[in-house]
Image (cartoon, rainbow, N blue to C red):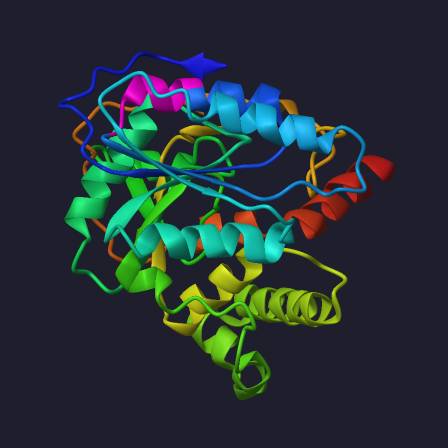
Amino acid sequence: MERDEFVPPAPLKTAVLFIVFNRPDTAKQVFEAIRKARPPRLYVAADGPSLNRVGEVNKVATVRAICTAVDWPCELKTLFRDENLGCKDGPSSAITWFFSQENQGIILEDDCLPSQSFFWFCEELLDRYVYDNRIFMISGYNKMLEWPEANSTAKSAYFYSSLGGIWGWASWQRAWQYYDKNMSGIEELALSGFFEDLLGRSLGGVRRRQLLRANKEISSGQLDTWDYQWRYIRHKHSALACVPRKSLIANIGHGDDATHTRLNSPDRVVRHQMSAPFGPPVSKSPDRKYDKRFLGIGLHSKLKRFLSYWRFK
């Protein structure tokens, strides 16, 4: 569901990386959104099929055909793998390939359906923060869908976060160059109290435990993913993300075909439009209330108090 309309202020000039795999239905929807935005350069990266999965070769071929059907003035580049690299090496190597040719750009996976304003939101902020080493990421997804605290700043289209989601995002080569799929040095930083110093005691403690657990599971092969490493490196460099006041991305990948998100959730299929220009926040500090809600901090204790109240009512 897309809410409101959007009028582009100018033709899009920013390159887009589209990471796809084996889901024709979702890939087609996201490609149509890209097609409508008409980026001047489109990079399509696809992992190779898993040969032990019946029908996957045909699905992968179908997706590649869908996502290369460019019919607007556009330079198309492809990175099609013959072998299956998985969710750790596949996306991360695709992003590295992208930033080896672009200084900045927009990144979409095949289950992240953007509103049209997402593209221009990313483009405006990529240009605004191109030399600001404090900002590592522009996120298109707002986990709260619309964050109330952001409304307190009348003309602010977004706010800063120490977290930020990767369901539709943008960044720069200057930030991605630090990506480390091995999460080097995390044990030492954890022992030093780095995360608590950076994020505060409660938020930092949760994040430290989360990243340590992910690192252990990635190292042992239990978890095949690329994004925890990106989260870690952003913390390591004390970097921030810009998060839109309203979510500009709907995740349409929840279901049986998903790798990590099998349960469908209605509140994740809403995408908003916002009008350009996208005014910056007055506050230069990250929104700690949002970050805590992002990780679910405080919700459990509030629920317990609520249940306790009604139990003895």
Residue 208 location, x and y as percent? 59, 71
Residue 224 belongs to magenta span: no
Residue lying furthest left: 10
Q: Is residue 178 above or below residue 287?
A: below
Front residue (pair 2, 193): 2
- Tell me, yes or no, if residue 190 can be seen here: yes
Residue at the spot 55% in from the left edge and 46% down from the top edge: 81
Residue 273 visible in image:
no
From the viewer's side, name the closer residue of 308 and 264. Answer: 264
Q: Is residue 216 left or right of residue 141?
A: right
Q: Residue furthest front?
A: 82
Residue 1 is situated, as x and y percent measured from the top left of the image, at 50, 14
Percent of width and height locating residue 89? 57, 57
Task: Tell whether 133 sits left or right of 142.
Answer: left
Rendered position, 135 above or below 159? below
User: What is the x, y in percent for residue 235?
Assistant: 44, 68
Residue for point 69% across, 68% down: 213
Q: Could you tell me which residue is drawn at 33 percent across and 22 percent down?
A: 116
Which span of residues is magenta-colored?
Answer: 32-39
Q: What is the quadrant of residue 14 in the picture?
A: top left
Number of numbered markers:
0
> Would residue 104 be found to the left or right of residue 90 on screen?
left
Task: Please give left or right for residue 243 compared with residue 6 in the image.
Answer: right
Task: Report the magenta stretch's main SS.
Answer: helix
Q: Is residue 38 magenta?
A: yes
284 over 32 or under it: above or below: below
Residue pictured at 24% horizontal, 65% vertical: 133
